[in-house]
Amino acid sequence: MPFNDSSPDQHDNVTSAARVTASWARARRAAWTSAPLALLTTAPERRPSRATIAPLPGPDRAAPAPFHAPPPADSAETGPSRVARAAEQVRALGAPLARWLPHAVAAVVVGSVVVTGGRYLWNAVASKPARTATSAPAAVRPQVLKRKLAGGLRVISTPAGAQVLVDGKARGVTPLTIPDLSVGRHEVEIKSVAGTIERTVTIAADKTAEIDESIFSGWVAVHSPFDLVVTEGGRALLMDDRRQIMLPPGRHVLRFVNRAVAYDAVRQVVLKPGEVTSVTVAPPPSTMTVTASEAAEVWLDGTRVGETPLNALPVPLGTHEIVVKRAAGGERRFTVTVTVNPFTLLVDFSRPAG
């Protein structure tokens, strides 16, 4: 009989088969297992109204035994009963149902899990407190490479060919351009056979400073209360009638000596081209002590400085005139040279002046 037959018996058979299949699916779902669910093969005793259905054949299982259902108590049919016909329909549909039923059940289970899990995740996300916005880390500033500030220096000298030293380091001979000096103050020396010139120059960024020097002699003017011998490096230097000494420009170490007053000193001077540099020799004073056999006044270079005894009177180095005047009349005159050593004078009026 075709499956799409629209007779009442056919509809009843399909309905009965569908109920059996639904019952089997509910049992499989309740067990939560992929193993085939074994159904009762025989009806319980004294329950003739419930049919016993053998398990549907699976893909790897032999076809089940024919389905036998007892006729209903109130049926009077002598041929195949309606239940028998339903069993025939079930057997006809058994193979396709057995093949597709596990997939259907798995789809139902997966759908249930997805729905349940989705609802759980939704509730969890909804109940989770919103994350507090945190401040983004400060942007790392790119490191700016600082360009080293530098400037230049041009050095010119007359005569040319002088050696140039910057901060004590030789950089070449004139005329010379130095392009890589750091910004700030620098000490520059220009040396030649005619002398040495020292200058302080300030370098500005991206600019070139210039030094233009003529190297020629300068003069040292010596001022002293007594005569001096001036030497440099053991060589005696001659003074002119103005007491000036001509020297190359630059730094000089001079020695000033006067053996008569036992004076010996070293001074450092820096000469500039064409300029006069003054040097004043002013040694500290020495001391003088004057005593006499009688009370007397003491005069130094025409100035009264006290009465005897006169102790440790400060006196400049050099030659001086001393007069000692007695109170009863008479005097004694002396020309003395006061040196760096203390000077002592003893006057005896009882002895003739000598």
Image (spheres, grey):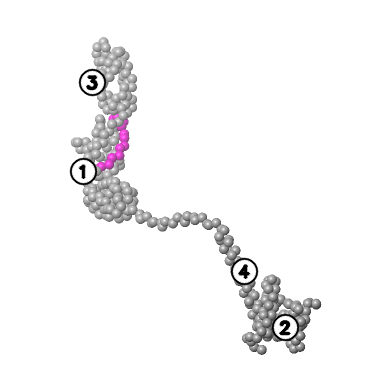
The part of the image, by quadrant, that contains residue 91 is: bottom right
Q: Which residue is mark 2?
A: 83
Query: In the rendering, at what x and y percent does residue 67 appear?
Result: 74, 83
Disc marking residue 274? 1
* N-term-proximal mark, 4 vs 3: 4
Task: Tell me if I can see residue 170 in this picture.
Answer: no
**In this figure, which residue is indicated by the disc labeled 3?**
302
- Rate crowding at label 4 as few (under 14), some (14 to 19) or many (20 or more) other CA atoms within 10 Å: few
Q: Which residue is mark 4?
A: 113
Q: Is residue 192 above or below residue 38?
A: above
Disc 1 vs disc 4: Cβ atoms closer than 8 Å? no
Which-is-in-front pick, marks 4 and 3? Answer: 4
Q: Give the residues drawn in magenta, as a range.
A: 259-271
In this view of the protein, can residue 139 be seen by the observer?
A: yes
Which mark identifies residue 211?
none
As measured in the structure, the alpha-carbon distance from the residue carrying label 1 to the one carrying label 4 is 109 Å
The relative height of residue 104 versus residue 153 in the rendered view (above or below) is: below
CA gap, disc 4 and disc 3: 134 Å
Task: State yes or no: residue 315 in magenta.
Answer: no
Q: Mark 2 or mark 3, which is nearer the start of the sequence?
A: 2
Q: Nearer the viewer, mark 1 or mark 4?
A: 4
Name the residue type under label 3.
Answer: Gly
